[in-house]
Amino acid sequence: WKKNKKKKKGTYQNITIEEYAEKGLGTSNLLVRMLTKPNSGQEEGGVTRDDLEIAKLMLQRKCLIGLTARMEESIIGFDRYFGWYDENALETNKCRKNLVEHGLSTHTHPRVSEGSDVWDLFHKKNELDMELYEFALDLYQEQREKIQMGNMNTAR
């Protein structure tokens, strides 16, 4: 987001996810854009397949991947990676359990079914982000295995 650009409160409050997708609102390939062109505006210039490859390298070299769909496993992986894990820490385990069961966000969002018209519109607009996500899923599994085996370097 540009610092000088402010949205009116409630701009998208009364719009359905279908209308949002059909109108082409939002930034395309935002994740690839943020990783490769962090100082550009939301839609200043397109992103390319070269940008996607750079984004993949950024994830591979600079990021420890976690998945909201595998929240507890991800948190434990972070704890192990950074040397914070203690299975006997009662308060930490309560906190983790609460986070996993209840999450942080109180906002609800409509689910979009894979293969639906809305899904296809978002997928087409964010094709490079979708490829980056698939790469991140594979990277998550790779990192998880290394952390479990103790073969991943810990933070310095």
Image (cartoon, helix red, strand yellow):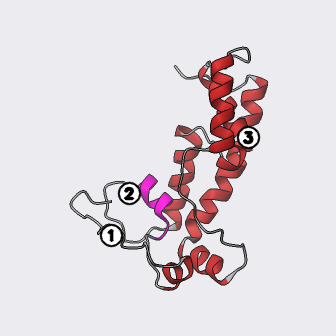
- Residue 89 sits in quarter: top right
Q: Which residue is mark 1?
A: 44
- Give the residue type that dot 2 points to: Lys
Secondary structure that dominates the magenta span: helix
Q: Which residue is mark 3?
A: 142
Q: Does 84 sit above or below residue 97?
A: above
Q: Which residue is mark 2?
A: 37
For marks 1 and 3, give the CA distance. Answer: 34 Å
Mark 2 touching mark 1, by CB under 8 A?
Answer: yes
Which residue sits at x=74%, y=22%? 150
- Residue 10 sits in quarter: bottom left
Task: Report if residue 19 is visible in the image.
Answer: yes
Residue 44 location in percent, x, y? 33, 70
Q: Does 76 sit above or below residue 71?
A: above
In magenta segment, residue 73? no
Mark 1 touching mark 3, by CB under 8 A?
Answer: no
- Give the residue type that dot 3 points to: Glu
Q: Does dot 2 land on a helix, a strand or a loop?
A: loop
